[in-house]
Image (tube, rainbow, N blue to C red):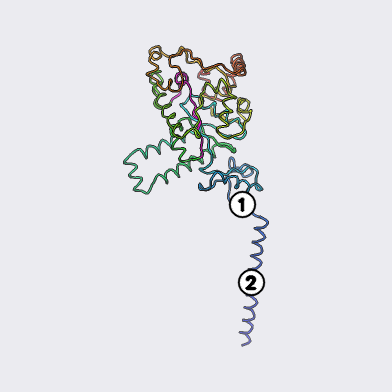
Amino acid sequence: MIFIRLLRRRLKFMDVKYFIIWILSILLVIWIIENDVFSMSECIKPIRENGNAESDINFVRLNDDVKESEFKKVNEEYAHYSDKIYPYNRNTPLIFVGGVPRSGTTLMRAMLDAHPGIRCGEETRIIPRLIYMRNQWTNSKKERERLSNAGMSDDVIDSAVGAFILEVIVKHGKSAPHLCNKDPLVLRYSAYMKNVFPNSKFILMIRDGRATVHSIISRRVTITGFNLESYRDCLVRWNTIIEQMYAQCIEVGSESCMPVYYEQLVLHPEKTMKNILNFLNISWSDNVIHHEKFIGDEISLSKVERSSDQVIKPVNLEALSSWVGKIPSDVLNQMDMVAPMLRKLGYDPFANPPNYGDPDSKIKENTFHVQQNKEYWRQLAKKYSIHIKDGIN
């Protein structure tokens, strides 16, 4: 009996002890929450530039149901953890720069990259391939049926494709408030991309097809479907692609897609860039008209891209009419038939040389400087392009 009484007394003591521990645990949890001992940013594990945990530049991936209008609230919530938290999801207002290759897309992205709030970076090359693959799946009746029977609806595929593209754009370069992608042929699929990224905007670079084709052929730029031995074949191919891109631009609407003429960008860069930044709802920065000053530091270039040796220079007139006198006469005489999009886009198909307009005085000065220092620019170009050794400048 004495043993039982002692045991009961011991159990009562244990109940009180555990009750006290329970109360203390609750108080500890409340104290931790009130004092924010454990940073939420550590729980979310933001993406850190180059995987470096010491970096203070972070991206935070949000669920796709979080609207763009709520991003500011997220920023405010995490402001005391870091002043450089960038939330992102498929509602992020991405910028896509494209056009037929050799139409000034690299110059455009370099000028945007010079802006302290924008990052475009080099061509990813993988994004247009993925979109093309997705397009092949859905355009094939048989494959579409197989996917449907496997539960692979358009929503499932597009969610996966969108997530993949988003991660590539976010992680393949330095962080910035405004993210941009420059894979020229992506703009063949602007309507699809607008569906996947509803707040995205598109800059369609348009250039005189004769200049574009001459650049492709003279610089030996390999593009699927372009026969580098024939100006006629290349012009026909240019016409097909720019027609598709222009139609896509019209389809997504003027609020989402802005055609930009390469010639006007070169002749009047400040005016053109002000229009572009206004279209993108991004504040002005003089950096964008002095992009050459930021090459190598703020602006990274791919040594294998054919335009890298050109965009290291200030905006100039060198490439504007370099095609004149290079296209065979039989092709020139049939230009309206070979490339009808020239006229539709406002170019005179029979003007040789064409009159694109008068350049700003600063552009004349830039051109004089480039022409007077050709060897300097050639030596500098070797640092940024592997193609200079081929004698291409």
Q: Is residue 79 above or below residue 358?
A: below
Horizontal side of 138 relative to 20 (left or right) equals left
Give x and y (percent) for residue 180: 54, 35
Horizontal side of 249 relative to 56 (left or right) equals left
Q: Residue at x 64, y 44 (%)?
A: 54
Q: Please state the extent of the stretch shown in magenta in the rendering.
A: 199-222
Give neighbour class at mark 2: few <14, some 14-19, many 20+ (Cα, 10 Å): few
Sequence-first tag of 2 and 1: 2
Is 313 in front, or is 376? 313
Find numbered disc 1 in the image and state the secondary structure of the residue it sits on: helix
Is 316 in front, or is 272? 272
- What amino acid type should be assigned to the residue bearing mark 1? Met
Horizontal side of 287 relative to 260 (left or right) equals right
| Residue named by callout 2 | 19
Q: Quadrant of residue 83?
A: top right
Q: Residue lying furthest front in this view?
A: 254
Q: Is residue 142 above or below residue 343?
A: below
Give neighbour class at mark 1: few <14, some 14-19, many 20+ (Cα, 10 Å): few
Q: Quadrant of residue 134?
A: top left
Q: Residue at x 56, y 20 (%)?
A: 267
Query: Which quarter of the image is occupied by the N terminus?
Result: bottom right
| Residue named by callout 1 | 40
